[in-house]
Image (spheres, coloured by chain):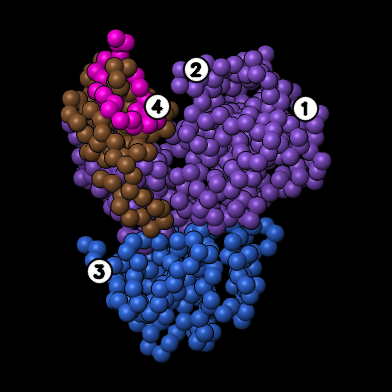
Amino acid sequence: MRIERHPILDFPKKQEVFFMFEGTKVSGFQGDTVASALHALGIKTLSYSIKKKRPRGFYCAIGNCASCHMIINGIPNVRTCITPLESNMVVERQINKGVVK
Amino acid sequence: MIYKDLIIIGGGPSGLCAAKTALEAGISVLIIDRNPKVGGQLIKQTHKFFGSKDQYAKTRGYDIASKLYRDIENFANLEILTDTTVVGLYKDNVVTVVNQDRYVRYQAGSFIVATGASEKFLAFENNDLPGIYGAGATQTLMNVYGVLPGNEVVMVGSGNIGLIVSYQLMQAGVKVKAILEAAPTIGGYKVHASKITRLGVPILTSTTVKKAIGETEIKAVEIISLDQKWQEIPNSNRVLPIDALCISVGLTPMHQLLSMVGAKMKFVSELGGFVPIINSQHQTSIKSIFVCGDVVGIEEASSAMMEGYLTGLFVAHYLNHSHKDHEVLVEHYESQLSLLRNGPFGIKTKVGLTKLKEGSNHA
Amino acid sequence: MLNQTGIPTLEQVLSRFPDQKSLIFPKAILECYEDIPCNPCETSCPFDAIHIGSNINVQPKLEVDRCTGCGICVTSCPGLAIVVAQIKGNEAQFKIPYEFLPHPKKSEIWHGVNRSGNVICDAKIDQVLINNKQDHTVLVTVSVPVIHLHDFITIRGKHES
């Protein structure tokens, strides 16, 4: 679900970045945030709410609302909407308050 | 501890303009912004701006951001920290910041809090489903990251942001099935509305969301019509299949640092929420802390820029380092602001600012 | 109507059209029906044919005799609220702003669309102009049957479903 051509903006082809999502190797592009890379792959559920385990995605996309928390490289509560995607990141859905291992 | 004459918290249009006049007055300025680059929300605005030449009318938002940065980048007295979040603002003129895992403290002679605003939420059943995004979020996703929020969407809210983002969604190839507006009339500029209706997108007034439908992500939205008392009209519900819902129900100032430092605040609904009480110099009840832009009242970027230029001048004056053209420039920017607020869309802001000044007792 | 739907009434539209006689030459139609702080149409016009004044909230007025129909205001208006219109026999020729992909090409036939977004006729693309000053807003010259002089506002590709 990437924009190829746009009437106002240019989206030049960027370098592919590989990372792990829930045990599967996937990819995004240089310049993505973790959330935008996942969204481009069609992954909208980023975590589950603490009490009722309802699926959650992002909302504000600029780091204000805390809807987009995921576990990255073992660290919980990472705001994926403002975290730049990096090679070999291990990204997992969070289902609780977050336990620092 | 590192010392600066002025620390500007927020490198959006207002903060960048404040930096320009302050730097021209000769004081040392540090801009701190939590994003990878300055420009605030301007960097994702692809439409041409309104206003007059002073507000860069007919220039696209992202070009205005570049221009505002170019205006200040060569000043020797300027330092800019990006990817840096201010986590504390204290009465003894100290600010604490975090960059990655580094924690640093700064002290300044003065501060400008230009933290802007944040999108409001809307309460309805299943409003937490993935696929429900703020309108600004869809703009970020499309215009900054080049990712489509969905293929068929409904926009909730017909203020300028709702109308503009709907147009931008269509430009990106997304089908906007309808724009919903709970009030009986369209909230934003009618030219924005006309731009979207000629594309075949209906604007449904007195209509709102009842609930979002879907298990793991949104698949449809149930909408209802409202009567003149804003109550649901029975049997008016219908379901629209969509894969993304955009919520554009207004912005609210990001006042948190001001509340933290103990500035006197007031809830003014016309200005969007909690705002600091200020005097005519944009000074809060803590005399070394000034404010400008959306954090002191939700308006357009054009006003934020004029307020920024003014506040930079006021701060330089406060530090006894007035800009050599202080009076002339203050009069110029104040008259620009007055012009911007002179039409029917400025009435709400003017009412809000009057209510705010009524709370001020430290002129 | 405009406040509820975003669609101006025929009366509003007609109020912005110069008389038929004037339209033998191309003239700007300024469909700005609301007081908003904005004046790039006035400042962009090289012939000083658009007047707003010092209070930039006032709606622009066209000085018909000065207007040459050059179309600079069409691509300057941030609201895309201006088109140029001309009566040419049994056709009406317009210059309209366009900001979508794919761009129309000369000689193509596209849908002609009215202010409600409905297809009303075929529209013949006469010319497509884009330059840096227009900043990504394409100026499309298009002809429709003259009966649609007051209805036509934009084009839509026939490739769109």
Q: Pointer 2: what residue?
A: B102
Foreground mark, 2 or 3, reads 2
Residues marked 2 and 3, same chain? no
Q: Pointer 4: what residue?
A: A65
**Picture quadrant where residue B29 is located:** top right
Residues marked 1 and 4, same chain? no
Foreground mark, 1 or 3, reads 1
Q: Position of residue C109 (x, y in %)?
A: 29, 76
What colour do you see for chain A? brown
Q: Position of residue B311 (x, y in %)?
A: 69, 35
> Where B240 sits versus B197, above or below?
above
Say the numbered circle drawn on residue B158. Answer: none
Q: Are marks 1 and 4 in contact (CB under 8 Å)?
A: no
What colour do you see for chain B? purple
Question: What's the distance in space between the residues labelled 1 and 4, CA to CA?
Answer: 36 Å
Q: In this picture, which residue range is highlighted in magenta?
A: A76-101
CA neighbours of label 1 inside 10 A, class few (<14), some (14 to 19), many (20+): some
Q: Amino acid at mark 3?
A: Lys
**Picture quadrant where residue B299 is located:** top right
Q: Pointer 1: what residue?
A: B319
Disc with the residue nearer the chain's start (1 vs 2): 2
Question: What's the distance in space between the residues labelled 3 and 4, CA to CA?
Answer: 42 Å
Magenta segment main secondary structure: loop
What residue is shown at x 76% (from left), y 42% (from top)? B330
Q: Pointer 3: what residue?
A: C158
Foreground mark, 4 or 2, reads 2
What residue is shown at x 50% (from left), y 20% (from top)? B98
Task: Provide the secondary structure element on which disc 4 rests.
Answer: loop
CA neighbours of label 3 inside 10 A, class few (<14), some (14 to 19), many (20+): few
